[in-house]
Image (tube, rainbow, N blue to C red):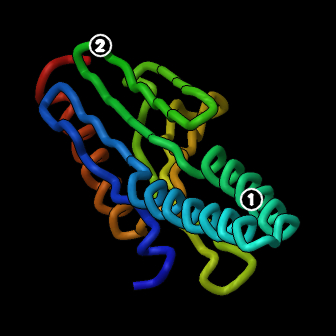
Amino acid sequence: MTLAEFLADPLRVTQISDSVLEIENRPVRRAVIAAAVILVAIAAGLAAIGDGATGTGIIVLAVVGLIGWLYMHELVQLTQLSLDRHAGLVRLRVTTLRGRREETFALSDLHKLESVAHYGTAAGNDETRLMLICGSGPERREIIVPMFRPDPEEVAHLTGVVNGWLSRQGKGNPS
């Protein structure tokens, strides 16, 4: 298991029925690991101050505060994707420490979910992204589902689940 695989939080189907499909990505593992590292670094800074190295302790606390704040605000996010046939809506909700962003559009506009490989400049820096494909022709929109380094196998499985659910659209309730 690589560090990226360890830090990747699972993509979960929280609800699936003929009329509703809900998926989420909770950053619990990443947040707990980051909080533990931040607390250990804060303890080291306070220990340095207690031992008389006040300048070093203050610098450690300042750097930990800055890096911890940046990490928690940029990378820790809850992503929820909800597809509802009764309402005829797709809702993509992303909650970060800075607030919530929500995008809603018609389910009839959603054609499929794609997994797209994004290749990094360095070895091992590749990642797979989920993309909602809406509309067609000049009105086509591609909406990236924000997640921090999801597991490519889970992305492929989730793509199959969503596209399978969408293909059953004509068999159950009308949208």
Apparent side of residue 71 relative to residue 160 in the rendered image (left or right): right
Q: Residue at x 28, y 50 (%)?
A: 12
Estimate how packed mark 2 is, as few (under 14), some (14 to 19) or many (20 or more) residues with alpha carbons within 10 Å: few
Looking at the image, residue 21 lies above or below residue 42? above
Left or right: 19 as drawn, with respect to 136: left
Residue sitting at 25 percent across and 21 percent down?
A: 85
Question: How far across and down, in percent of the image, does residue 54 sit?
Answer: 83, 65
Label 2's element?
Answer: loop
Q: Position of residue 13 (x, y in %)?
A: 24, 46
Horizontal relation, residue 160 to residue 72: left or right: left
Mark 1 Cα-neighbour bin, 10 Å: few <14, some 14–19, many ≥20: many
Q: Which amino acid does the dot numbered 2 rest on? A: Ala
Q: Nearer the viewer, residue 34 or 108?
A: 34
Q: Residue at x 43, y 52 (%)?
A: 27
State the residue in front, 102 or 57.
57
| Vertical relation: 77 (above or below) 152 | above
- Residue drawn where x is 55% and y is 33% of the image: 136
Of helix, strand and loop, which one carries label 1?
Answer: helix
Residue 102 lies, in percent from the top left, at 52, 24
Q: Could you tell me how far apart the alpha carbons at marks 1 and 2 are, in whole angstroms?
A: 50 Å
Q: Which mark is residue 149?
A: none
Question: Which residue carries the number 1 mark?
Answer: 61
In which quadrant of the rendered view does residue 24 lie? Answer: top left
Task: Tell me the kind of residue under disc 1.
Answer: Leu
Q: Which quadrant of the figure contains the C terminus?
A: top left
Residue 116 shows in this picture = no
Which percent across, then down, holds residue 63?
78, 61
- Residue at the disc numbered 2: 87
Q: Nearer the viewer, mark 1 or mark 2?
A: 1
Is residue 17 visible in this depiction of the protein? yes
